[in-house]
Amino acid sequence: MKNRSKESVFGMCSRRDFLKYCTVMAASMGLPLAAGERIAEAMTDPKRPPVIWISGQGCTGCTESLLRTSHPTIDSLILDLISLDYNETLDAGAGKQAEEFMDRSVEANKGKFVLVIEGAIPTKDGGIYCQIAGEPFVKIVKEMADKAGAIIAIGSCASWGGLVASDPNPTGAKGAPEVLKDKAVVTIPGCPPNPYNFLSTVAYYITFKKLPELDKLGRPKFAYSRLVHENCERRPHFDAGRFAEEFGDEGHRKGYCLYKLGCKGPVTYNNCSILQFNDVGTWPVRCGHPCFGCSEKGVGFTIPLFVEADIKKDTVFTPAATPAGIKYERGGKVSGTAAGLVGAAIGAAAGAAAVTVTRMKSEDEK
Ligand code: FSX
Ligand code: SF4
Ligand code: F3S
């Protein structure tokens, strides 16, 4: 795949569409639009570093999620665009043949290739609970990481253990950052993660030869700096105190906020409510299901779904793109507020009949 020419990539989608895709990618990372051209140039360079994708304890949903991308025509382009040299699920070859191909690619691209780790890493009893070609996955991860140019942990399992590490964690499953303590590991949590967050991270690395800005958990800030709740389409209902109380009740049918059904959007950092999934404009909350907090360590697979998120009093949420302009006070009545609502201090007590939303002064007003 590394030898493909730029023309072969453009052959699968028009140059114009491809540039558009790269420009959108640049914008989603907060880069100037002109960076789109640079990304397009780097991503079609025949000498770009390959991606080696290894899988441990996971459900393969991370790879499945990658296959659901569709712009540009990703079903084939994804394999060329990022030069995916090894992925056990997608490889046509298997066994010795595939292993040898991977070894060759790793040796030829030492210090340059992007290592993607999918799934958790079992560490108990010498890591015997996940072995590939007779080798414990934990050993493979460490060896490959020493040779990689960049390391990406894709999915919650690889980022912090996810579902696999949930109590009682019989295999001692850990995320890649915990196993590779002395290395920089980018984490793209989510179960499954959004494939565009992954693609954008790879594109950034290939273009600028460095990693994008990360938060303290190794997450790219362009994707994980806002709470799911902040841009949720049901946010106006939350702000107005309109909640579904039970699955299938009138509030649920009307699309009210799912907070009381256990939605963890107010305590989960991810861009699901903006990016959505599968290019058909859907995501858990739009389907009527509360956010489970799948991407947030200590929330997903830890706090039961039915337990209300613990929103600390005085938490300040950045406003939704379309603020409700509604003030709701416990025991009070709903009233419209003036335009310019830019933030809300939310206090919610477990089991309380309502949330309190207090209007705050905008920067301009201050
Ligand atoms: Fe984990 Fe990947 Fe969840 Fe599944 O393999 S992040 S279980 S969607 O897919 O690792
Ligand atoms: Fe959306 Fe959940 Fe927040 Fe309600 S609590 S606004 S459903 S993210
Ligand atoms: Fe996961 Fe919640 Fe997004 S469950 S996919 S973080 S909406």
Image: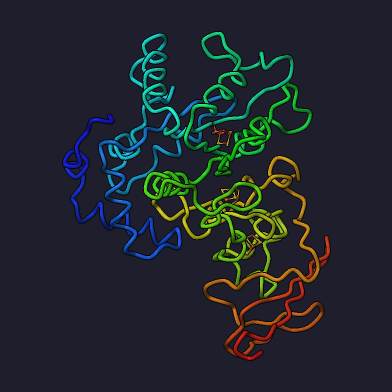
Residue 308 is situated, as x and y percent measured from the top left of the image, at: 76, 55
Frontmost residue, 40 versus 272: 40
Residue 342 is situated, as x and y percent measured from the top left of the image, at: 61, 80
- Can you say which quadrant of the picture contains the C terminus? bottom right
Vertical position of residue 43 compared to residue 87: above or below = below
Q: Residue furthest front?
A: 111
Vertical position of residue 328 compared to residue 66: above or below = below
Frontmost residue, 326 versus 224: 224
Q: Is residue 316 left or right of residue 340?
A: right
Quarter of the view holding residue 359: bottom right
Quarter of the view holding residue 240: bottom right
Colouring style: rainbow
Frontmost residue, 254 versus 167: 167
Q: Is residue 206 left or right of residue 14?
A: right
Which residue: 57% across, 77% down?
Answer: 323
Residue 264 is situated, as x and y percent measured from the top left of the image, at: 68, 54
Vertical position of residue 193 compared to residue 341: above or below = above
Q: Is residue 326 left or right of residue 208?
A: right
Which residue: 28% across, 39% down?
Answer: 77
Quarter of the view holding residue 255: bottom right
Residue 62 is situated, as x and y percent measured from the top left of the image, at: 50, 36
**How many marks on residues?**
0
- Can you say which quadrant of the picture contains the N terminus? top left
